[in-house]
Image (cartoon, grey):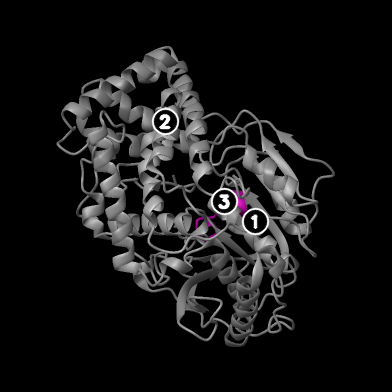
Amino acid sequence: MRGSRPKKRVAALGSAGALVTATLIAGAVAAPTANASAGSGHGQDREARGAAIAAARAAKAGIDWQDCPADWNLAKPTQCGYVTVPLDYAKPYGKQIKLAVDRIGNTGTKAERQGALVYNPGGPGGSGLRFPTRVTNKNAVWANAAKAYDFVGFDPRGVGKSTPISCVDPQEFVKAPKADPVPDSEADKLAQRKLAREYAEGCQERSGAMLPHMTTPNTARDLDVIRAALGEKKLNFLGVSYGTYLGAVYGTLFPGHVRRMVVDSVVNPSRDKIWYQANLDQDVAFEGRWKDWQDWVAANDATYHLGTTRAAVQAKWLELRATAKKNPLGGVVGPAELISFFQSAPYYDSAWASTASVFSKYVAGDTQALVDAAAPDLSDTAGNASSENGNAVYTAVECADAKWPTSWRKWDRDNTRLHKDHPFMTWANAWMNLPCATWPAKQQTPVDVKTGKGLPGVLIVQSERDAATPYEGAVELHKRFKGSRLITEKDAGSHGVTSLVNPCVNPRVDSYLLTGKLDGADVTCAPHATPKP
């Protein structure tokens, strides 16, 4: 399941989660070669050389900044441009693809400016182009960092405005209702396996030439080319969710190119976890956070009238699920669509009240509110194309990054076992990832994430009860990146901590970005404010 904000997740498989100036700063041209030892063998050496060639080329070319195209919906003074990168870094002079980038200059003085801060929101498949809107929307949490840094966003390879990939017709992709992800029979499993296989075939048909190159290491190389195109000698990076894995791989391949790095809500970078096991771990964490939400709903029964105990709220959920399975609400909202809608509550505290409110209206007799919230909007062709593209990139990257089990018996055994105690997400997540079992393109061995020469102290921020990226991931990256510091938000579980208001977290992120200083020891913070009903 994706680790960034889910759009309305309507996966075809069942359901679920769902730059500076063109002038050169000395040093940006002669991009040092990457740390080839991070991978293994000659392929990596060739790719490291290819990345250095591409970075040198980009440093020379810079970025031709213009007002953003009107349909990108990015208000002035945000500027947009493109950076050209090789599709295959082993062939730096071969086929090239374009990456869309945008930026807004630092809000402080020339003397206060510390360069560009490049952002990735996760996914894989998330667009970073909204990042500069934190300045135009006057986001107070980021006001101090914005004084010092140009805020730079980009669409990773395959995403959105950057040579996008696709696996299925977007209108088909969002059609509802889909089959209940929880199988009742072997026939149900067989039908889902067929859908997963067809989805993988669709990716090959529509985007086959890109698939072998849709990897996290290639996106990390792209990030280094963007750094060079910006005229930056070293990278300042903020990665959330999957963006933390991108940061971890970048820090491993290019340790000497990192200036400051903040990673928030951390994917476990262990090779054993990428990506099959990471998804199983999510299922367990989602169940825990789903229960946290139900406890909150029960505590606010005076507002929502869904029951005064977690068990009572769960009973109402199961009743809703059974009703929608028998007769999809409004003809379109079945269990798959319900999971897509309700899963935003375990993802983000900011969705707690809105999700509970829609649920409460349904129980009080207003079915339409739930249909409106959970059904696809077939008239929103741009939004549907974006959802389909996000899912395609998610699948392509996770399938290409690592070797996945090909034995259906293993998938069946693992998910059947997990579902018993973690029913909220398990099967929906399994079907979303199952195309990787029959993936038509080469699957790599994940990078061995570790500290290399020149890597500075990295700031790691993590909530203790995060569903999408369980806490152990932050602990694992902390072990691997020597000199890193871990800020733990205790008794909290919202995904993406650095954008929440927490007087213990925000000043530490600011201090690190502005001065490079980390606390002398790891820090445990009290949780941010609990949502109000």
Q: Which residue is mark 3?
A: 240
Chief secondary structure of the magenta portion: helix
Q: Are marks 2 and 1 in contact (CB under 8 Å)?
A: no
Question: Is residue 91 placed above or below 442 in the rendered structure?
Answer: below
Picture coordinates of residue 100, whole percent (x, y): 46, 72
In three-dimensional space, the C-alpha distance between marks 2 and 1, rounded to whole angstroms, equals 34 Å
Left or right position of 99 against 322: right
Residue at image mark 1: 248
Q: Identify which amino acid the numbered label 3 is placed on.
A: Val
Q: Is residue 53 above or below residue 258?
A: below
The answer to which quarter of the image holds residue 23 is bottom right
Extreme-right residue of the structure: 520
Disc sitting over residue 173 in the figure: none
Q: Label 2: which residue?
A: 353
Q: Report the amino acid beneath label 2.
A: Ala
Callout 1: few (<14), some (14-19), or many (20+) C-alpha neighbours within 10 Å?
many
What is the span of residues highlighted in magenta in the rendered image?
134-143
Q: CA distance from mark 3 to mark 2?
A: 23 Å
**Residue 67 falls in image quadrant:** bottom left
- Which one is nearer the viewer's eye here, 280 or 333? 280
- Front position in the image: 45 or 310: 45
Q: Is residue 116 above or below residue 245?
A: below
Pair 3/1: label in front: 1
Callout 1 amino acid: Ala
Residue for point 74% across, 83% down: 26
Label 3: few (<14), some (14–19) or many (≥20) C-alpha neighbours in 10 Å: many
Looking at the rendered structure, the secondary structure element under dot 3 is: strand
- Image coordinates of residue 529 in percent, x first then y, are 58, 31
